[in-house]
Amino acid sequence: MDTGTLQQLSDIGKKAMQGCLCGFYNHPEKECTCPPGAVQKYLNKISGPLLDRIDLHVEVTPVNFSELSSDRLAEKSEDIRERVIKARDIQTERFGNKPDLHANAQMSPQMVRDICKINAAGQTLLQKAMEKLGLSARAYDRILKVSRTIADLAGSEEIKLEHLAEAIHFRSLDREGWAG
Ligand SMILES: [Zn+2]
């Protein structure tokens, strides 16, 4: 990788959101030196409507060098690519008669009702998550769309409880008192 590319990657990394002003919130080894309440105040700056428009929230803690360089058994990129292509094919077929639609994310609220059906146990899980996390109606649809994609990636025709649970997990920044 040349230095230009590295610089670009580094710039992208800096644009990713930090959990707090000092940057050490949730750090496994270093301590966050922000005064009490500052973390919450910082997070509140990122408004709900903005977070509602972001599909996947993932909290990442720094990885140390030994972990990065260890030979862990990870899924190969080619295998992941294969899986993604299959999931895209499923979606192309799903929206075959609608030329403007290519991905689950583009579904209208009515299509979400028709296509992202979940069983009674799923309804209960989602309802509980909505109440516990204080999620908006938009987040509700977002979770259903993401769970449909997770099911597509798993090659599953139905949205199973595990797919739904994973999708709920991706709304972590909606949690009330995330920094509490
Ligand atoms: Zn801090």
Image (cartoon, grey):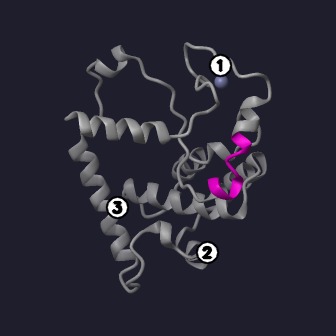
Q: State the image coordinates of residue 154 (x, y, percent, origin top left).
A: 39, 53
Amino acid beneath label 3: Ala
Which residue is label 2 attached to? 109
Q: In which quadrant of the rendered image does the C terminus lie?
A: top right
Which residue is label 3 attached to? 87
Cα–Cα gap, marks 2 and 3 = 21 Å
Q: Which mark is residue 114?
A: none
Cα–Cα gap, marks 1 and 2 = 41 Å
Q: State the image coordinates of residue 23 (x, y, percent, origin top left).
A: 58, 26
Which residue is label 1 attached to? 32
Among the 4 quarters of the image, the one containing residue 108:
bottom right
Residue 49 lies, with reference to residue 102, above or below; the image says above
Residue 30 lies, with reference to residue 139, above or below; the image says above
Q: State the image coordinates of residue 61 (x, y, percent, origin top left).
A: 51, 27
Describe residue 134's horizontal placement relative to residue 4 as left or right. Answer: right
Q: Quarter of the picture for ligand 1?
A: top right
Q: In which quadrant of the rendered image does the N terminus lie?
A: top left
